[in-house]
Image: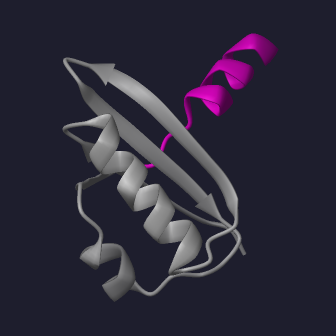
Amino acid sequence: MIVSFALEFESRAEMEQVVKRLQKRHEVSGELEMLPLGEGRWRLTVFSEKPLRESTLESLPGKRVSAHSAVRRESLQGEE
């Protein structure tokens, strides 16, 4: 089962700290998409092969938002 979620951050450094935490402490494997949003903000979209508890997700810094991959959106538009 793939679990997907997205978080927005005020800086790239803050996002990179969360990526390290997910990979080292929570042993998340799968795809991580890091996307600049402008004005220094970043979005991290995670497609995890490992299920994560809701309490784990809530403990992560950043603002939780809908998980939409820019890559998937572009590939779907190209197929129409």
At 43% from the left and 45% from the top, the residue drawn is 44
Left or right of 32, for residue 21: left
Q: Position of residue 27 (x, y in %)?
A: 62, 77
**Is residue 57 at all visible to an observer of this figure?**
yes
Q: Position of residue 41 (x, y in %)?
A: 25, 30
Left or right of 20, for residue 18: left
Q: Is residue 44 above or below residue 26?
A: above
At 73% from the left and 22% from the top, the residue drawn is 75
* Residue found at the far right of this picture: 79
Q: Position of residue 15 (x, y in %)?
A: 35, 48
Tell me which corner region of the image, top left, top right, bottom left or bottom right, holds residue 77.
Answer: top right
Residue toward you, 6 or 39: 39
Q: How would you classify the magenta stretch by its main secondary structure?
A: helix
Membership of 10 in magenta stretch: no
Q: Is residue 25 above or below residue 7?
A: below
Magenta-tinted stretch: 66-80
Instruction: Quarter of the image for the C terminus: give it.
Output: top right
Membership of 78 in magenta stretch: yes
At 41% from the left and 48% from the top, the residue drawn is 16
Left or right of 64, for residue 54: right
Residue toward you, 24 or 34: 24
